[in-house]
Each structure stands twice: as C-alpha cells, then as structure tokens.
Image: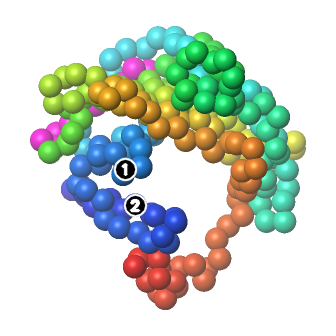
C-alpha cells in the first residue's frame, strides 16, 4: 500500500494545504520541492546499491556544536563560525548562493540509485550519496524523464551536543538545491545570525486540540 497525499505548512498564513501528487514539483518560492532534500526521497521506487567509495562531503565547523540548557529544552550556542554566503562577500567571483568558507572532508559513502515506479513522477531516476557510518545523506542527483540531470541537492548536517553528552541532535545547517535547467538555486540556512534554535522543548497539548487544528487547517 502506498499513499500519495502530501501536505505543506504555510507558516506565514498559518494554514496547511494538500500538495500536488508529484512531490518533485518545486514550491512557488524556490527550487526546493516537497522531497527535494537528500533525506526526503520517500516515494515508492526500485532501489539498488550502485557502489561504495570515499567522497568529499560538506561539513561546517565546529562539529559537534555546543547545546546549552534553556528554560525549556536546549538551545544552540550562538555559532561563531557562520557560513559566509557569496551574496554577502565583497569581491566574491563565484556563485552568489555558494558559501565562501565551506569545508569538505573525506567520508565513506554508499551510492544508491532510486528509479521511480510512478509514471507521473517527474524524476525518472535519483542518485543519493549516504554516509556509511553516520547515515547522513550529502548529495542527491535528480534526472528528468529524458535522463537529463535536472536538480542537484547538497546537504550538510552538524551534531549539536551538550557538554555532558547527555543530549544530542542532528541539525541540518546548509541545504542547497540547484535547478540545472535555468541555473537557479534555493538555499536553506537554519544557522544564521539571530536565528534562535531550541531542541527538546516539547509541544503543548493545546496545540493538538480540535479547535486549534481546525484554525491551522483553514
């Protein structure tokens, strides 16, 4: 049994809506589709292991990052080494959406291929690069029905950990989705100046009452 219903939250409007059956369709505001992330390839398909190798993969420093106790849960200490994006760096001659101070390290990965069973699905084939020890997905290549490269997704994840090591969390810190057709890109930067991230804070039960859910479903 498979389910094709997918829902998207519009946090600005405070509402949810059913998305298109084709989860490869990008959002109206960028190139990141419902399943564009490396960890979001959830459709039914044929999967196979292409191979194992060492690969240069993205990494932001320091790693792990320090988590401090907060009033509720834990908060990520203000990062001192934030990514400097090309659009903010004077004299940068590379792509505006590429970080100017990114780090790469060598990691053992699986290279996995997924071929769509659904003929309506926009991607005919996807190739994922997944860490063999950490199970982190770093890259995804998505190909259209003609077999041409359509999108490339890059993802880096840091570990947030308390000083005592009693609580830890995997935190995506940079996601890049490049549409190779018009050469457009969309960036997600969860770690940026002024961004307050809290983990393990829990959610109030009041959020899940019928009246509250109906408010958010309009």
Tell me the residue at 82%/34% (across/down): 80
Determine crowd level at label 2: few under 14, some 14-19, many 20+ residues with C-alpha closer than 10 A.
Answer: few
**Quarter of the figure with the C terminus:** bottom left
Estimate the x, y position of residue 54 in percent, counting from the top left. Answer: 52, 11
Q: Earlier in the sequence, mark 1 or mark 2?
A: 2
Asked if residue 203 lies in the magenta stretch, the reply is no
Q: In the displayed structure, does residue 187 sit left or right of residue 151?
A: right
Please state which of the two labelled residues, at mark 1 or mark 2, is closer to the viewer.
Answer: 1
Q: Residue furthest front?
A: 91
Q: In the displayed structure, does residue 51 sit left or right of residue 168?
A: left
Asked if labels 2 and 1 touch by Cβ distance under 8 angstroms, the answer is: yes
Q: What whole-number distance in Å separates the C-alpha atoms at marks 1 and 2? A: 10 Å
Tell me which secondary structure the magenta stretch mostly adopts. strand
Q: Nearer the viewer, residue 105 or 84?
A: 84
How many numbered discs sit on the rendered protein?
Answer: 2
Query: Would you name the residue on which mark 2 appears?
Result: 8
Quadrant in which residue 93 is drawn? top right
Q: In the displayed structure, does residue 138 sit left or right of residue 124?
A: right
Query: Would you name the residue on which mark 1 appears?
Result: 27
Q: Nearer the viewer, residue 157 or 194?
A: 194
Estimate the x, y position of residue 213 in percent, counting from the top left. Answer: 47, 80
Asked if residue 116 lies in the magenta stretch, the reply is yes
Question: Does 202 sit above or below residue 23?
Answer: below
Residue 64 visible (yes or no) = no
Q: In the displayed structure, does residue 4 sit left or right of residue 52?
A: left
Name the secondary structure under disc 1: loop
Question: Does 196 sit above or below residue 99?
Answer: below
Magenta residues span: 110-119
Q: Residue furthest left?
A: 119
Quadrant in which residue 100 is drawn? top right
Tell me the residue at 12%/41% (across/down): 119
């Amino acid at each position: 049994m498979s389910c094709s219903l997918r829902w998207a939250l519009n946090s600005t409007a405070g509402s949810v809506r059913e998305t298109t059956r084709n989860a490869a369709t990008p959002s109206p505001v960028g190139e990141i589709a419902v399943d564009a992330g490396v960890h979001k390839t959830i459709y039914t398909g044929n999967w196979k292991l292409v191979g194992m190798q060492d690969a240069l993969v993205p990494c932001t420093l320091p790693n792990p990052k320090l988590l401090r106790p907060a009033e509720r849960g834990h908060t990520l200490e203000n990062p001192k080494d934030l990514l400097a994006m090309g659009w903010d760096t004077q004299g940068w001659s590379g792509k505006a959406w590429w970080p100017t101070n990114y780090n790469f390290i060598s990691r053992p990965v699986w290279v996995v291929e997924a071929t769509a069973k659904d003929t309506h699905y926009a991607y005919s084939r996807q190739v994922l690069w997944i860490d063999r020890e950490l199970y982190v997905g770093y890259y995804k290549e998505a190909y259209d029905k003609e077999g041409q490269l359509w999108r490339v997704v890059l993802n880096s994840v840091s570990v947030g950990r308390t000083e005592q090591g009693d609580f830890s969390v995997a935190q995506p810190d940079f996601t890049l989705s490049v549409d190779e057709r018009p050469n457009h890109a969309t960036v997600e930067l969860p770690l940026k100046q002024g961004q307050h991230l809290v983990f393990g804070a829990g959610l109030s039960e009041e959020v899940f009452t019928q009246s509250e859910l109906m408010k958010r479903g309009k």
